[in-house]
Amino acid sequence: MSPASPLPPVPAHASAVSVVGIGADGWAGLPEPARAVLLDAEVLIGGERQLGLLPAECSGRRVPWPSPLRPAVRGLLAEHTGGATAVLASGDPMFYGIGRALTEELGAGALHVLPHPSSVSYACARLGWPVEDTETVTLVGRPAARLAAALHDGRRLLVLSADAATPAAVAALLREHGYGPSRMRVLEQLGGTAEDCLDGTAGTWEHPPGDPLNVVAVDCARTPEALRLGAVPGLPDEAYEHDGQLTKRHVRAATLGVLAPAPGELLWDVGGGSGSVAAEWMRTHPSCRAVTVERDLVRAGRITRNADRLGVPGLRVVTGRAPDALAGLPVPDAVFVGGGLTAPGLLDACWDALPPGGRLVANTVTLESEALLTEWYGRHGGDLVRLAVAHAVPVGGFTGWRQAMPVTQWSVQKPVPGPDPGPAPRLRPAPAARPAPDPSYASGDDR
């Protein structure tokens, strides 16, 4: 096993942008190394609230972040080069903080990060929750619908609030999804002298908006009649709004199995229908991304609603007819074709868009599309399977099987170019014939 790559050296303070985490306790809660950096800084960059926590002894020029923040990061820091620069961040800068944007813009070697305990650490300490067992969802600059994907009976969640209105939005979402009995605690000004906690349940939440600096703790509890959504692909068909254009539950589970989503990967869902495959791809990991292409405007709107309901509002919906609508989309790691297979050039465009190692999966129920998949299977290999599902239904006073339309599925991985294998190896001699089994050995399974 090769040794791990060495970590980059910690840069000298004088030549780096210092990123200092600060809590609600302000200057009093900072350790001496962080104080020294802020006292020496010629330029202090941060939010108005963070800058207001510093004493007059921090005499550097104070520069508040503009809005929107991200596009201004590089230009603002470039404008203030030449002197010691310190950037203030709430809590741990590398946990849903400005540290990520700074690292992506400047590189890790240009930063000297001094973290402070995060609001999550404070909240878990107050609640007695193990940090490693507590899921965190941030709603800072993100839609509240993201929370829906994390809702499971008995789970503990911490929600990073965008402002004072976030707790009420969380309570409304919990009620909408059948989690009204969930206990909610809003922890305000964690670590500061004004720390406070509001307690209640989502179903009866009536607290008025409080401090904008808050974290919402949720003990998830589902009502018995609420639809149960698991953590793996194959959600109930009832979870979707649809007009019949839906990859049904058992076929959907098999389809996601061969698509094999991994963290950070991007899916093209071509012929989205109700968006079920793309939505469940994204639910497998928060970093999974998907683009669904649907030609029908009504169905496109339905896909967006399904994505919100299932906690993946980041699903991108492109309205248009494939293959033309595929032009300009980011390179996919996998492509699923659930409709429109016989459109001229569609499979060619999907195959050409895939990088080496990318996966393509196509489903169909028609003979014409099946013939096309058979042709591509003969050309590129992969797996060609037929999925048949039957459901037990009443037959008079008895029970019988009702067969759904069989689905033909082709799945394939685009080859990865390898080195020239060189001359073919010499073949070994054929092994000697295996002796016939002893008839007295009555195992019935001679392997």
Image (tube, rainbow, N blue to C red):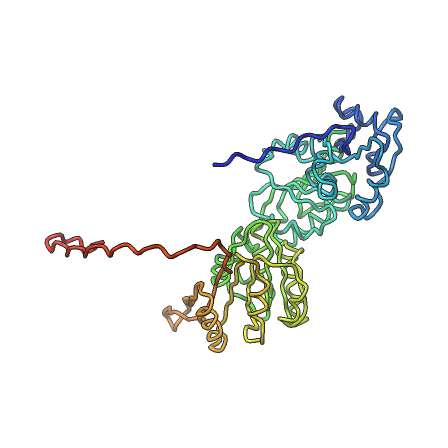
Q: Which residue is farthest front?
A: 423
> Residue pushed farthest left?
440
Work out whether residue 424 can be spotted.
yes
Where is residue 212? Give x, y as percent.
Answer: 78, 40
Residue 188 relative to residue 84: left or right: left
**What residue is rendered at 39% in x and 72% in y?**
395
In this view, the residue in front, 334 or 189, is 334
In the image, residue 110 lies at what x, y percent?
74, 36
In-image side of 250 versus 68 (left or right): left
Residue 166 vertical position relative to residue 292 in the rendered view, above or below: above
Q: Quadrant of the C terminus?
A: bottom left
Query: Where in the figure is residue 394, as x and y percent of width and height?
Result: 41, 70
Q: As drawn, is 318 to the left or to the right of 222?
A: right
Numbered label tally: 0
Give the quarter of the image for residue 352. bottom right
Residue 273 in sight here: no
In the image as oriented, which residue stretches furthest toward the top? 32
Q: Nearer the viewer, residue 184 or 165?
A: 165
Residue 103 in the image: state x and y as whole percent: 71, 40
Farthest residue to the bottom: give it.
368
- The one of 383 and 308 positioned closer to us in this rendering: 383
Q: In the figure, residue 86 lies in which quadrant?
A: top right
Q: Is residue 411 left or right of residue 176?
A: left
